[in-house]
Amino acid sequence: MTPLISILIPAYNAEPWIGDTIRSALAQTWPRKEIVVVDDGSTDQTLQVARQFASRDVFVFTQENQGASAARNKAFQLCQGDYIQWLDADDLLSPDKVTRQLAVAQECQDKRRLLSSGWGYFMYRPSRAQFLPTPLWCDLPPVEWLLRKMGQNLHMQTATWLVSRELTEAAGPWDTRLSLDDDGEYFCRVVLASNGIRFVSAAKVFYRQPGFDRLSSIDRSDKKLESQFLSMQLHVGYLRSLEESERVRAACLSYLQRWLKYFVRQRPDIVNKLEHLAADLGGQLTNPRLHWKYSWIERVFGYGIAMRTRSFLPGVKWLFIRSWDKALFRLEDRNVAIRPGNCSRKST
């Protein structure tokens, strides 16, 4: 039988994007699909917009706000698919994304084979998405994938994966304790349970850029910092469960060192735990140093001011680029609306 694909969309306050995301799911050329949207207690019009798409193939549910992981777990409980396509509420799939990956899945005949794809950042204009290959964009066994991810600070975007139901069930549910890096931790478990990754280069995902820096763009609340630390602990354990070697320990130490700077000023208790984890790996962490562009600020005004400047200036640059891209997007949209034959759009 033709496999049923479940496209699962958790949504929270995604009113500007959810319509395009659902249309992207509906546009998939694979003929047998269902789309499950779980609104996680949005306070804007996300639920109302999603319900406009409700049909035989689009199911829309709502729940009290419990976090993205809980919404994803609910979506999986409700779906019937043989394969799972996760899709965040502001991202887009190329129309043949699922079709191309399923062709490889049917060729492999292995439900434990995990399928990935390329992905590109965009802000408002998908046509301008930048697809920049990384060392994860190839076929890899689980241990090599985790080594590269952690040792080189790489990741694969959530929607790149196509996962069989068998593999999804083997990996277990999303961890509701995590409010940050929940996707990184979850797909580590999926990789761990798999027989390896097949990369399908022709399949593509469009990832709406959320910010210039995952941690710099948030409030660095204790909850989020604790979530990041828990995810890091789990990452290290997952990789070491596959292989206990010098190269694994080196990758884990590099991973801990890279994230250390986010905890130094606010959570010395977590820094202490990271140092103990590094010692268990046979190494030690060094105090993070600021780039030379900010080191003079540290000497004059102190480390705290230097760190805030380091977060603020790239944020201003990113905000300018995002505003410019939004203006061009609106201009392009207006030009399309006034072309002959687009009267329906012109009136909106």
Image: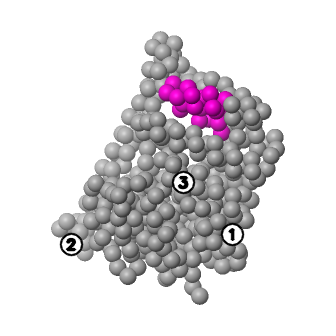
Mark 2–mark 1 Cα distance, whole angstroms, equals 49 Å
Q: Which residue is at 51% across, 55% downward?
A: 120
- What amino acid type is highlighted by mark number 2? Cys
- Residue 265 lies, in percent from the top left, at 51, 25
Label at residue 175 = 3
Per the image, label 1 sits on a secondary structure element best described as: loop
Mark 1–mark 3 Cα distance, whole angstroms, equals 21 Å
Farthest residue toward the top? 300
Residue for badge 2:
343
- What amino acid type is highlighted by mark number 1? Arg
Q: Which residue is at 65% across, 36% downward?
A: 256
Mark 3 or mark 1, which is nearer the start of the sequence? 1
Is residue 270 found inside the magenta-colored segment of the image?
Answer: yes
Mark 1 or mark 2, which is nearer the start of the sequence? 1
Which residues make up the magenta segment? 255-275
Label at residue 112 = 1
- What amino acid type is highlighted by mark number 3? Asp
Q: Main secondary structure of the magenta part?
A: helix
Q: How many marks?
A: 3
- Residue 12 lies, in percent from the top left, at 36, 56
Per the image, label 3 sits on a secondary structure element best described as: loop
Q: Would residue 182 be found to the left or right of residue 106 on screen?
A: left
From the viewer's side, name the closer residue of 205 and 230. 230
- Residue 171 lies, in percent from the top left, at 63, 62
Please say if the residues under marks 3 and 2 sit with CB atoms less than 8 Å apart: no
Is residue 184 found inside the magenta-colored segment of the image?
Answer: no
Please tell me how crowded label 1 is: few (under 14), some (14-19), or many (20+) other residues with Cα within 10 Å. Answer: many
- Residue 34 lies, in percent from the top left, at 45, 77
215 relative to 127, above or below? above
